[in-house]
Image: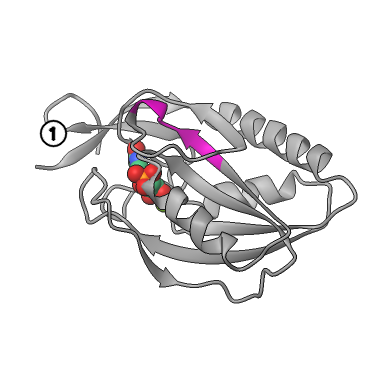
Amino acid sequence: MTKYVKEVLISREEIDQMCQRLGNQISHDYEGREVTLIGVLKGAYVFMADLARYLTIPCRVDFMSVSSYGSGTRSSGVVRITKDLDTDITGCDIIIVEDIVDSGLTLNHLRQLLGTRKPASIAICTAFDKPQRRKVNVKVEYIGLKIPDAFIVGYGLDYDGRYRNLPDVSILGDDGQGGSK
Ligand code: IMP
Ligand code: MG
């Protein structure tokens, strides 16, 4: 079945305010320190670029790639690392940057895994959160916006690899519900 972009849920302006708020909060909490932002590819690439530019503290960036979804809209529960970090994070203040927390399985796994590498501290920052769908209780220090249980696309989030480039966040609907492709 073809999927259609149904309605805009979060506008570009709201997203920008959210990034500014998170950037201010993190800059305040880590004042006098340097943070290492770890983006979870591919979804976090857009958010991380915006967030990083709202930080007023020194920062480094690195990326990891994990795979927990096939081409559908539900988590398989299996988290596989497909690209590891390029840098050593021992002794670093790291912030894992995610696009969205859904079941929590991905971040729960990443938090445990990166913890074994002895960073000075670990925090998680997510753009979006779907608390209703949580399967594991993972601590998320910085949350942009909580959203209802709907599948969203845009602003880095995809369906089957598409729609990541949409500047705002939209709900994905099924074919025939009157949306535009
Ligand atoms: P979790 O392991 O179930 O928390 O899934 C997290 C990952 O699933 C995110 O990093 C996204 O890649 C993907 N995901 C979860 N919900 C959505 C959504 O509504 N739209 C697009 N991707 C999603
Ligand atoms: Mg992701």
Q: Position of residue 91 (x, y in %)?
A: 75, 66
Name the residue tied to disc 1.
175
> Percent x, y for residue 39?
56, 57
Residue neighbourhood size for the residue with mark 1, other residues' Cα within 10 Å, grouped as few (<14), some (14–19), many (≥20)? some
The image position of residue 172, as x and y in percent, is: 27, 34
Whether residue 114 is visible:
yes
Q: Is residue 32 above or below residue 87?
A: above
* Residue 107 percent coordinates (x, y): 46, 49
Please give left or right for residue 59 compared with residue 84 in the image. Answer: right
Q: Image quadrant for the N terminus?
A: top left
Side of 54 where 78 appears, left or right: left
Identify which amino acid the numbered label 1 is placed on. Answer: Asp
Asked if ligand 1 lies within 8 A of label 1, the reply is no
**Magenta segment:** 126-132
Instruction: Please determine whether, in this image, residue 114 is positioned above or below residue 76.
Output: below
Give the residue at x 58% y 53%: 96
Question: In the image, what residue occupies the spot 61% across and 68% down?
Answer: 117
Residue 4 sits in which quadrant? top left
Asked which quadrant contains residue 20, the reply is top right
State the count of labels: 1
Indicate left or right for 93 with 43 as reference: right
Using the rendered view, name the quadrant where residue 6 is placed.
top left
**Quarter of the figure that contains the C terminus:** top left
- Who's the residue at 52% across and 54% down the image? 111
Q: Secondary structure at mark 1?
A: loop
Residue in the picture at 56% in, 72% down: 85
166 vs 72, nearest the viewer: 72
